[in-house]
Amino acid sequence: MPTQIYVNLPVKDLGTSEKFFGGLGFSFDPRFADENMLCMVVEDGIYVMLLTEAYFATFTGKDIADATKTTESIIALGVESRQRVDELVDKALQAGCTPSKEPLDLGFVYTRGFHDLDGHTWEATFLDPSALAG
């Protein structure tokens, strides 16, 4: 059975999150959507479940981290090119997000990041495949 990854994130407003992530080029699986959640498709087998904070709270007995004040995780996406790194992060910044750090450019790896509208930290990274050939 192929491995699937589901990242669950609490969000304040599903409509705002759908518009934001849709604007970054992500799609949603309507089979897993209702007034409490959206299933964002990163690629086949990798999904981000955007859950209202109230619904997210039903999955845990812990307090939900305020991602605008503390880092609970960094969601890193490997993308196909340096251009896609810039495209993704620039769109996020234009939509009102803030950068999470200075760009990292080591030649063979290029990374930029942003804090989304709920404060979650995202990174886009390109790793030159020729750097892995040994």
Image (cartoon, rainbow, N blue to C red):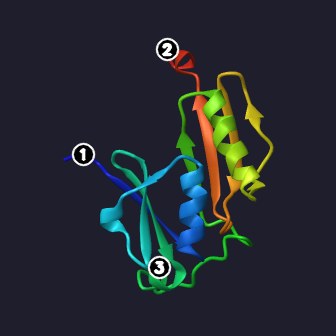
Label 1's element?
Answer: loop
Q: Amino acid at mark 2?
A: Ala
The quarter holding residue 83 reads top right
Labelled pair 3, 2 in contact (Cβ < 8 Å):
no
Comparing 113 with 95, the one in front is: 95
Specify few, some or many for label 3: CA neighbours under 10 Å numbering under 14, 14-19, or 20 or more: some
Q: Amino acid at mark 3?
A: Phe
Q: Is residue 86 above or below residue 33?
A: above
Rendered image: mark on residue 56: 3
| Left-right relation of 4 to 130 | left
Tell me what residue is drawn at x 68 percent, y 66 percent. Answer: 119
Image location (x, y in percent) of residue 36 = 43, 79
Foreground residue, 82 or 130?
82
- Looking at the image, tell me whether mark 3 or mark 2 is earlier in sequence order: 3
* Of callouts 1 and 3, the N-terminal one: 1
Provide the secondary structure element on which disc 3 rests.
helix
The first of marks 1 and 2 along the sequence is 1
Mark 1 nearby-residue class (10 Å; few <14, some 14–19, many ≥20):
few
Looking at the image, is mark 3 or mark 2 nearer the viewer?
3
Task: State the separation of the CA atoms marked 3 and 2.
Answer: 42 Å
User: At label 1, which amino acid type do we have?
Assistant: Pro
Q: Position of residue 9 (x, y in %)?
A: 51, 68
Reply above or below: 67 against 25: below
Q: Residues within 10 Å of mark 2 (few under 14, many from 20)?
A: few
Pointer 2 residue: 133
Residue holding disc 1 = 2
